[in-house]
Every structure is written in structure tokens, then in C-alpha cells.
Image: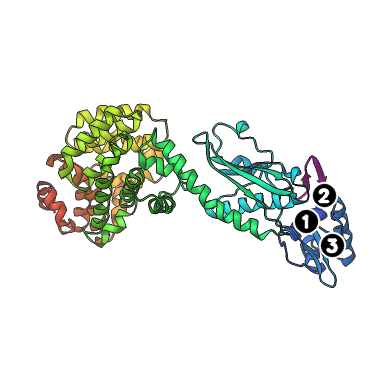
């Protein structure tokens, strides 16, 4: 195991130290593992500008490095000589330790135990740890350090490392084996275990690279399902899926990552009601995330998605009766696809609410449903409780506050809206951009809202109006609430493009508002 500057190397309990020049030799050779480098190439890499260059200096450096590594020129494990050619790093790229990266990492390979039990196969063990790190880095697009002495119990409680892969090496007779155990910091438990035999072969151990590439997708799928299930115990499904993703800062990337996992789970377990409801909600999230683009192509852009959501939920409903968290999501999705499900949705939501132990999540979703079905006062009682139970500055709290804003806008209570809107905007720099077209004052719109309007084409404006109507205003059962929900975006778009920019379905949903808007133009 090498330090990031290659000035140190750890062999069990022994530590070797290298000069700056020796470290440069190690770095250039090991980063080109398997490739013969000429003396001139090594000289160019290790020499300072203006310094004397000599083939003999390379040979001296190589000999010193070999001694410190305990490497024999006649039977080398690390550095081989290619006569007439140069030198080559024989093993896999070395495992590099970086304390700062461990502090910042979201995943860690470690602890790594039992390498000294493998004897001559210890190099294969080190290589396997390194290959796991590389395969994981490729999947999550994050740096993954290997830390043999990693102790998750000593990590700061608010540190970013979300899980670690513990590797335990041992021997059965003369056969080297290992167990990979994956621990989730989110759930506090093991989510994946596999035992395997290390195939006997020489460096750079291609079979171990293939094993690492095979294991990592399985590990990530198991981690995602474990953490999503754990988070559903305290968060709405949409928040749980987002938080289980490695792309928390990018909602669109999180959706794509979740799509990979859920599609695999659906293929493996087509009759699982939990997976069916989760996938239905995942499709609903697609409309929320990508709807502005989907609806720009026309009013029917999301009809097939809604139909699939409806079919999934209907098929899963019998298996959700004793699972209140799933039942609550099913109620919300049924109401979303068709307000004709109102009575059934409220009945299911009430049943789920009365049985649920995930009370904060139930309060949030049931509160939103109550707002959509016209009971604003009852909705706000539930939503304010959910807000109080949410962690400050959490995505869940933001999720609840958006629901509160929806209810207050529908009730036309701008005085109560303003302080909640300010908290919504403070959650993320992009929040104001996302919500301003709905939350600004219709009569005195903000400069930001006016600026957003100036950047839009007519077709884009039509798509945005269809989108807002589909995911928000049409869900209010009370006609006056639909009018209030649409008032601000209609006013802004009509001022910019004239009343013909308003799609027919919005006119039919709130005709009185359309008449008022067209009278002003």
C-alpha cells in the first residue's frame, strides 16, 4: 500500500520510505503497469528541468527502490528488467492510501484483513482490493480509497462515507479465499456478503479484475434496495429513492441510477407489489423531473406513462393491504392518474394513515391528498405536523414545505405563503428558479419571473403550462382551487404571448380564469 505521494509504502507492520526521485520512479512505473518504459522515458518523468540526465542514474534509482521493496532482480515481484528495452511494473497498479480522500469518500474499501495469511498470494489479495475500488469508482463516478485499517466506528457521525466493503482473506488448506462483507452506514447493517476463492494466476490477475467487475453491480443493487427500504421507514418514497442514489445533487442523474436498479428488480421479481409500486412512483417522478420537455411535444406526451402507473398500482394493490407505506403511495398515484379514484384514494390513505408507524411520511402524503380534495384546513394540520417532525434543512422538510405552499396557493392565502416560500427558496440555489413562475405574485411578478418569461419560446411556454396543469392544478377537486393554482402562471404567460398561448385543457379546467386573463390582453 503506497501513500499518495509514493514517499511511503506499507508492508504489514513495516513501512518503507522513498526519496523524491525514488517516489517519481515508483509513480511512473506503477501507473503504467505491464508496459515497458525505456530509460529515456523514465528519465523524462523523474528529472527536473535543467538537471543532468544519465541512464546510469535510472539504474541506480531502480536498484535502490528494489532493495526497499524487498524485490529481487532475478525473481522480481514488482519491477522487471527488459534487456535492451527498459523496466516494467509487473504487478497491478498499487493500492494508494489517501487519508484526505477517506475523509471525503462516499464509499471505502476496508478494512482489509488477513493479507498476511495468504503468503505468496498476498499480492493477489492486494490486487483484488484495488480492482474492487476501480470497478466501484467507474460505477459511482466518485473516488474510492482502499484503507486496510478502516474502522467505520471511528468515523465522524456526519461524515460522508455511506458504506464500506470489508474484505477478509484466509486459507482453506492451500487454497486462498476471501469473504466480501458490505456494511451500510445508513441502515447500520450488512446488505451484501459473498465468499469466493482466489484463482491461482500471476500478475496482473485478470480473473480477479473480472470478479470485481461482476461483484460491484450486485453490491450496488443490494445497497440501493437496502437503503431505500430503510429510508421509506421515515421518508416518502420519492425522497427515499433520491437519498438512496449516489447522485443526490442531480435529480435527473438520480432518476437514471434508480431506473437501472428498479428495472433490474422488476425483471427479477415481476410479481413483487413493493417493486411494482416503487416503479410506478419512479415513473411519476419521471414526469415531475422531465415534464417540461415531455409536454412541449403535446398534451398526450405523458398519457402512456400514466396508463402504466395505473396498471402497476392496480395490479399491486392486493399485496399492499398489510403494508401501509405502500398503500399510501398507491392512494396518491391512483388519485394522480384520475380524480375519479378520489373516494378509493381517500379510503386507502385513511387506512394507511391509521396503521402506519412511519408517521412523518404518512402525514405528508395524506396532507397533500386532503389539500387536493378540498380540505385545506385539515391538510395544513397534517402538513404542519410533518414539517415539525422533519429534520431541519433535509430534503424531506423541503418536500413537505412545497406541499404546504401548494395548499396555501390553492386557498389564495398569500400572507401565510410568504414565510414558507422563503424557506423553500433557501433550500437550494435553484429552488427559486423552479418555483417562481407559480409562487410569485400574479399582479406584481418578481423581476426573476419576468426574466424567465423573456427566455421562453411560445412552444416552451405551452409545454410549461401543460406540465404545471398536469402535475398540480388539475389535481385540485375544487374549481376555485384550480383557478388559484393557475392564476399566476396564466397571468405571466398571457402577458408575454397573449391568451392563445393557453392550451385548451387549461381553458376547460379553469374557464373563469381564462376569461379574466383574456379580458386583460
Question: Of helix, strand and loop, which one carries label 1?
Answer: helix
Marks 3 and 1, the one that precedes in the sequence: 1
Question: Of helix, strand and loop, which one carries label 3?
Answer: loop
Is residue 260 shown above or below 156?
below
Q: To which quarter of the image does residue 202 belong?
A: bottom right
Look at the numbered discs 3 and 2 and tell me whether their residues touch, using CB distance below 8 Å: no
Q: Which residue is mark 3?
A: 51
Q: Which residues are magenta?
A: 4-18
Look at the numbered discs 1 and 2 and tell me whether their residues touch, using CB distance below 8 Å: yes
Q: Which residue is mark 2?
A: 18
Give the class, few, some or many, for how many residues have Cα within 10 Å of label 2's Cα (few <14, many ≥20): some
Q: To which quarter of the image does residue 106 belong?
A: top right
Q: Is residue 179 inside the magenta stretch?
A: no
Give the class, few, some or many, for how many residues have Cα within 10 Å of label 3's Cα (few <14, many ≥20): few
Q: Quadrant of the C terminus?
A: bottom left
**Total numbered labels placed on residues in the image:** 3
- Residue 258 in view: yes
Instruction: Tell whether 74 sits left or right of 335.
Output: right
Q: Which residue is mark 1?
A: 26
* Residue 456 % position (x, y): 29, 58
- Between the residue at mark 1 and the residue at mark 2, the CA separation in whole angstroms equals 9 Å
Q: Residue at x 53, y 40 (%)?
A: 162
Q: 474 or 433, which lies in front?
A: 474
* Residue 452 % position (x, y): 31, 52
The disc label shown at residue 50, or none = none
Is residue 84 shown above or below 395?
below
* Residue 103 % position (x, y): 61, 39
Q: Residue at x 26, y 41 (%)?
A: 318
Amino acid at each position: 500500500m503506497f501513500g499518495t505521494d509514493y514517499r511511503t509504502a506499507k508492508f504489514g507492520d513495516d513501512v518503507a520510505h522513498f526519496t523524491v526521485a525514488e517516489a517519481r520512479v515508483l509513480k511512473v512505473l506503477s501507473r503504467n503497469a505491464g508496459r515497458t518504459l525505456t530509460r529515456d522515458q523514465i528519465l523524462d518523468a523523474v528529472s527536473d528541468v535543467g538537471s543532468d540526465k544519465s541512464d546510469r542514474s535510472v539504474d541506480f534509482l531502480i536498484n535502490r527502490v528494489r532493495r526497499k521493496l524487498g524485490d529481487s532482480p532475478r525473481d522480481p515481484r514488482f519491477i522487471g528488467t527488459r534487456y535492451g528495452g527498459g523496466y516494467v511494473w509487473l504487478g497491478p497498479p498499487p493500492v494508494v492510501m489517501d487519508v484526505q480522500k477517506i475523509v471525503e469518500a462516499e464509499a471505502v474499501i476496508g478494512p482489509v484483513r488477513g493479507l498476511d495469511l495468504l503468503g505468496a498470494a498476498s499480492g493477489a489479495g492486494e490486487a483484488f482490493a484495488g480492482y474492487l475500488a476501480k470497478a466501484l469508482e467507474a460505477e459511482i463516478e466518485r473516488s474510492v480509497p482502499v484503507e486496510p485499517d478502516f474502522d467505520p466506528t471511528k468515523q465522524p457521525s456526519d461524515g460522508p462515507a455511506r458504506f464500506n466493503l470489508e474484505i477478509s482473506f484466509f486459507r482453506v488448506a492451500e487454497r486462498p479465499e476471501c469473504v466480501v462483507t458490505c456494511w451500510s452506514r445508513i441502515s447500520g447493517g450488512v446488505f451484501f456478503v459473498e465468499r469466493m476463492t482466489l484463482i491461482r494466476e500471476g500478475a496482473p490477475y485478470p480473473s480477479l479484475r473480472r470478479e470485481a467487475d461482476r461483484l460491484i453491480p450486485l453490491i450496488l443493487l443490494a445497497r440501493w434496495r437496502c437503503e431505500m427500504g430503510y429510508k421509506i421507514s421515515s421518508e416518502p418514497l420519492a425522497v427515499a429513492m433520491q437519498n438512496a442514489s449516489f447522485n443526490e445533487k442531480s435529480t435527473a442523474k438520480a432518476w437514471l441510477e434508480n431506473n437501472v436498479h428498479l428495472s433490474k428488480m422488476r425483471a427479477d421479481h415481476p410479481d413483487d407489489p413493493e417493486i411494482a409500486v416503487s416503479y410506478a412512483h419512479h415513473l411519476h417522478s419521471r414526469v415531475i423531473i422531465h415534464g417540461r420537455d415531455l409536454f412541449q411535444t403535446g398534451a398526450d406526451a405523458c398519457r402512456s406513462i400514466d396508463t402504466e402507473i395505473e396498471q402497476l398500482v392496480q395490479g399491486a394493490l392486493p399485496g399492499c393491504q398489510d403494508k401501509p407505506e405502500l398503500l399510501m403511495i398507491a392512494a396518491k398515484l391512483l388519485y394522480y392518474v384520475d380524480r375519479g379514484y378520489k373516494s378509493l384514494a381517500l379510503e386507502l390513505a385513511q387506512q394507511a394513515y391509521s396503521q402506519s408507524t412511519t408517521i412523518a411520511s404518512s402525514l405528508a402524503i395524506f396532507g397533500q391528498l386532503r389539500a387536493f380534495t378540498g380540505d385545506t384546513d385539515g391538510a395544513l394540520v397534517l402538513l404542519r405536523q410533518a414539517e415539525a417532525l422533519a429534520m431541519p434543512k433535509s430534503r424531506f422538510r423541503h418536500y413537505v414545505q412545497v406541499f404546504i405552499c401548494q395548499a396555501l396557493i390553492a386557498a389564495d392565502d398569500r400572507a401565510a405563503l410568504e414565510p414558507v416560500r422563503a424557506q423553500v427558496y433557501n433550500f437550494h440555489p435553484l429552488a427559486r428558479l423552479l418555483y417562481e413562475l407559480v409562487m410569485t405574485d400574479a399582479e406584481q411578478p418578481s423581476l426573476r419571473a419576468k426574466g424567465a418569461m423573456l427566455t421562453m419560446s411560445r412552444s416552451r411556454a405551452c409545454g410549461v403550462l401543460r406540465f404545471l396543469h398536469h402535475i398540480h392544478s388539475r389535481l385540485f377537486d375544487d374549481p376555485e382551487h384550480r383557478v388559484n393554482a393557475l392564476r399566476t402562471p396564466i397571468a405571466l404567460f398571457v402577458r408575454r404571448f397573449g391568451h392563445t398561448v393557453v392550451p385548451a385543457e387549461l381553458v376547460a379546467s379553469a374557464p373563469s380564469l381564462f376569461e379574466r386573463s383574456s379580458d386583460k390582453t
